[in-house]
Image: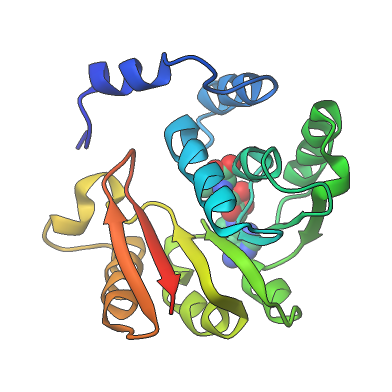
Amino acid sequence: MDLLNSRITDYIAAQPGTSPSPLDEMEDYAREHKFPIIGPMVGRILQQLIVMTGAKRVFELGSGFGYSALWMSMVLPDDGTVICTDTDENNERMAKEYFSRAGFESKLDFRMGDAINEFIKESGPFDLILNDIDKEGYPDTIKPVKERLRSGGVFVTDNLLWSGRVIEPNPDESTRGILQFTKELFNDPDFLTSIIPVRDGIAIAVKR
Ligand SMILES: C[S@@+](CC[C@H](N)C(=O)[O-])C[C@H]1O[C@@H](n2cnc3c(N)ncnc32)[C@H](O)[C@@H]1O
């Protein structure tokens, strides 16, 4: 199910300044290889959240080849860092290459391994945490994120609408992970949560 009219999406994507290089190349790569990335509309929202919260320390669970992380790095202060995680060495290599080309390599700290395992090695506090791992793992992120996100920090999670599958009968394991995660996050009084129905739906949860 397309959540947004494709002409509207194209109209937004055509606005000036969207996806400066090498983000545009990364989008081409993702399109060619059918690799899921957050896309430019969510990239812009992430940048706004970084600036609004004055974020310096960012953790990303499930970074792929660094596309979402590069959007965030571009507006982090010079001494800001984004810790990326992924299980695929090729993604780490590509992320390092793109960050280097963009001149932001000093802001990248890439950790190979399971995202939650790598995350719990860190004590925090983080200003912003982005969650984009396999969807069945989503419910297990809430507790460690709550312990490591500063008050006023933002927890962003991608794919909350899962191409509309969240409202279809007989959800599969991934969809069940998203449904459980969404319910728990909205019920958690320590977070102020909303879903923005942009692209595949992002949850924005502000820690109180
Ligand atoms: C949707 S992609 C991430 C895309 C990235 N956030 C972006 O928009 O550019 C998900 C990535 O998370 C990785 N991944 C999924 N589950 C993971 C886990 N439990 N631990 C570490 N990496 C994981 C996958 O290898 C994949 O590269």
Q: Residue at x 31, y 80 (%)?
A: 184
Quarter residue 175 falls in: bottom left
Instruction: Point out residue 15 in the picture as x, y percentages from the top left corner.
Output: 42, 16
Quarter residue 24 falls in: top right
Q: Is residue 208 above or below residue 101?
A: below
**Residue placed most toward the observer, 151 or 117:** 151
Q: Residue at x 15, y 63 (%)?
A: 170
Q: Is residue 207 above or below residue 38?
A: below
Q: Does residue 36 appear in the picture of this structure?
A: no
Q: Is residue 63 above or below residue 113?
A: above
Q: Is residue 117 above or below residue 173?
A: below
**Residue placed most toward the observer, 24 or 46:** 46
Left or right relative to 83: residue 131: left
Left or right relative to 132: residue 25: right
Q: Does residue 51 appear in the picture of this structure?
A: yes
Left or right relative to 26: residue 177: left
Name the colour scheme.
rainbow
In what quadrant of the picture does the N terminus appear?
top left
Instruction: Point out residue 205 in the picture as x, y percentages from the top left corner.
Output: 40, 67
Quarter residue 199 falls in: top left
Instruction: Point out residue 143 in the picture as x, y percentages from the top left corner.
Output: 50, 85
Q: Residue at x 84, y 26 (%)?
A: 101
